[in-house]
Image (tube, grey):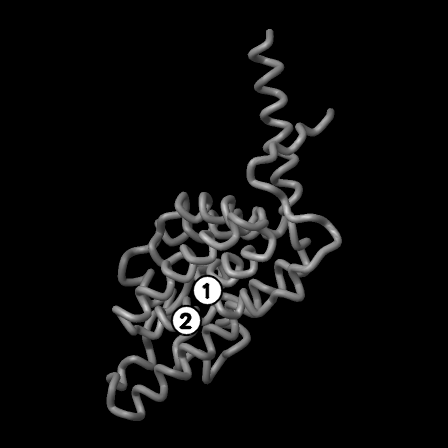
Amino acid sequence: MDGVIGCRRALRAVAAYVRGAPGTYVWLLILFVTTVALHRMSPALEVDFLRQRSTNLHELSDNPVRVLFASAMWIPSGHWWPYAVLYTVFHAPAERRLGTLRWLVVCVAAHVLATLISEGALLWAIRCGMAPESAVNTLDVGVSYALAGVMGVLTYRIPPPWRYPYLTAVLACFGVPLVLGRTFTDLGHATAVLIGLGCRPLARSGATARNPKETPACPRG
């Protein structure tokens, strides 16, 4: 009997957590549906399908608004579970702490601005002969820029002294690939983190940042 009660309490706690971050889990549900759809396509069709929704230079010049939105609804790797974990670890806490509207502003800002900056750098590289002309059709879809931006802004909702090792880890996670790889996606990720850090005004709240050592009270029901 105690086990049944404990299970019900756990389910209520999970449901309350999900309700506290509706945007995160609606987005995750959309990604699940689109990932299933990708698995039903042939490899050749999948590549062509994603390229039409890619934020590459060709598509951005023709349909910027459409591809900026569509590119954030697909996962090119076809693996949904890692994103379910990452969304729960980063997006959900950020949405719960910032509120859905401010969380969404950070996501959109990081996704759009990091895309435009990284693709602008790629265009410059093509014109300078540092990248091939074919790079205008590079496949570039996914949700990682928004995720990187949220990881950046989440820094301000973590109390000291845990804030500083967290920030160090985030900067290392995206800074090291930029130094070693120097691809346009590495630049996009690093830019998205900086955009998230630049969204500090959106992270300000009258509520005190939660101490990771504190256990939140179980919801009543």
Is residue 57 toward the left or the right of residue 7 in the image? left
SS class of the residue under badge 1?
helix
50 left or right of 132 in image: right
Looking at the image, the residue that sits furthest to the bottom is 128
Pointer 2: residues within 10 angstroms few (<14), some, or many (20+)? Answer: many
What is the spatial separation of the Cα atoms under label 2 and label 1, in whole angstroms?
7 Å
Q: Which residue is mark 1?
A: 145
Instruction: Name the residue type under label 1.
Output: Tyr
> Secondary structure under badge 2?
helix
Residue 215, quarter of the rendered image: top right
> Where residue 190 sits: x, y (%)?
41, 68
Residue 25: which numbered mark, if any?
Answer: none
Q: Residue at x 56, y 12 (%)?
A: 3
Within 10 Å of the Cα at label 1, are there few (<14), some (14-19), or many (20+) other Cα atoms?
A: many
The residue that mark 2 highlights is: 188
Q: Nearer the viewer, residue 172 or 165?
A: 165
The answer to whether mark 2 and mark 1 are in CB contact below 8 A is: yes
Q: Quadrant of residue 138?
A: bottom left
Task: Decide which of 71, 147 is in the foreground and name it.
Answer: 147
Q: Position of residue 141 (x, y in %)?
A: 41, 65
Q: Foreground: 189 or 108?
A: 189
Residue 100 horizontal side relative to residue 60, left or right = right
140, 70: nearer the viewer? 140
The quarter of the picture where the C terminus appears is: top right
Q: Position of residue 70 (x, y in %)?
A: 50, 66
- Mark 2 and mark 1 lie on one chain; the one further toward the N terminus is 1
Q: Is residue 89 above or below residue 122?
A: above
Residue plotted at (62% across, 14% down) = 5
In the rendered view, tell whether residue 126 sits above or below residue 73: below
Q: Amino acid at mark 2?
A: Gly
